[in-house]
Image: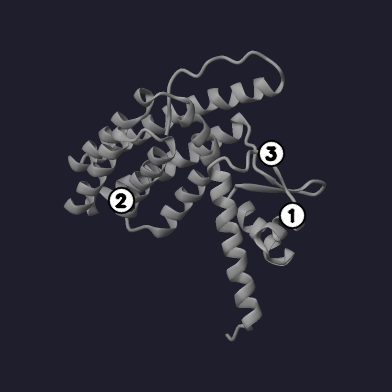
């Protein structure tokens, strides 16, 4: 099938706009609940509104933006129930991914993962820790040889990324989940599928509990109530 040059250029521009907005959302530069106006975004990036509209549709498919019929595109603001659902689905998918990854896990990959954990323990900047956290999980799951499964997991991780960034930045280094990552890797190296699946489940359940507490506190602040303090940190 032949494509017109203007269609190709528009698709490329929409991808670039989506990529830049995705980074801003995940790093908290565009806070949950922020309204994204097509004309303003188009002017900021020096493009027409057509690729901006297509970028919004792409981000909506990824769960980062919602298109409201009255307000237009709005950065997704999940409820506690939304967040818990994300993690329930992640638990099922990531347990499946690690099951497939273990038989295919190579020594070079293990060394990469060990290095990531070591750098996570040393990381002081929350953004560096979060980048390594994502790399650890996605590198491990890539060993499963299931690209569609990895893409689904990546999309779900992206959807909760803004809250993970805010939460991790608010917690001390000692409360980051480095030991849980080590437990996951140790089970994988031992070729113990059940232990690896159990470590993934515990890791994600701790994360969902802590993030739900954090998100609930954010909602209480928005209502002018005194929030409860989150107990520990997440990933």
The numbered disc on residue 20 is none
Disc 2 and disc 1: Cα gap in Å? 45 Å
For the N terminus, the quadrant is: bottom right
Check disc 1: other Cα within 10 Å, few if <14, some if 14-19, many if 20+.
Answer: few
Label 3 crowding class (10 Å Cα cut-off): few <14, some 14-19, many 20+?
some
- SS at badge 2: helix
Task: State whether residue 194 appears in this view.
Answer: no
> At numbered mark 1, what does the secondary structure look like: helix, strand or loop?
helix
Q: Which mark lies nearer to you, 2 or 1?
A: 1
The reply to whether residue 114 is in sight is: yes
User: Is the residue marked by circle 2 packed among few (<14), some (14-19), or many (20+) residues within 10 Å?
Assistant: some
**In this rendering, position of residue 177 left or right of residue 216:** left
Which tag is nearer the camera, tag 1 or tag 3?
A: 1
Q: Say whether residue 45 is left or right of residue 83.
A: right
Instruction: Tell me the element at label 3.
Output: loop
Residue placed under numbered mark 1 in the picture: 40
Tell me the residue that label 2 is attached to.
100
- x then y, percent, for residue 171: 44, 24
- Residue on which disc 3 sits: 33
């Amino acid at each position: 099938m032949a494509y017109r040059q203007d269609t190709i250029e528009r698709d490329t521009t929409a991808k670039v706009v989506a990529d830049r907005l995705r980074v801003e959302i995940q790093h908290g530069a565009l806070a949950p609940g922020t309204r994204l106006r097509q004309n303003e975004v188009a002017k900021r990036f020096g493009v027409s509104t057509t690729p901006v509209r297509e970028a919004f549709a792409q981000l909506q498919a990824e769960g980062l933006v919602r298109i409201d019929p009255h307000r237009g595109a709005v950065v997704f603001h999940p409820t506690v129930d939304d967040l818990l659902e994300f993690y329930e689905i992640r638990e099922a998918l990531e347990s499946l991914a690690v099951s497939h990854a273990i038989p295919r896990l190579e020594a070079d990959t293990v060394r990469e993962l060990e290095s990531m954990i070591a750098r996570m323990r040393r990381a002081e900047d929350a953004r560096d820790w979060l980048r390594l956290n994502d790399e650890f999980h996605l590198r491990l799951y890539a060993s499963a040889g299931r690209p569609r499964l990895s893409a689904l997991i990546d999309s779900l991780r992206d959807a909760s990324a803004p809250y993970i960034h805010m939460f991790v930045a608010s917690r001390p280094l000692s409360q980051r989940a480095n030991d849980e990552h080590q437990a996951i890797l140790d089970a994988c190296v031992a070729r113990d599928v059940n232990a690896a699946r159990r470590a993934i489940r515990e890791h994600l359940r701790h994360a969902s509990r802590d993030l739900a507490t954090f998100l609930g506190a954010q909602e209480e602040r928005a209502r002018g109530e005194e929030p409860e303090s989150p107990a520990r940190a997440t990933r």
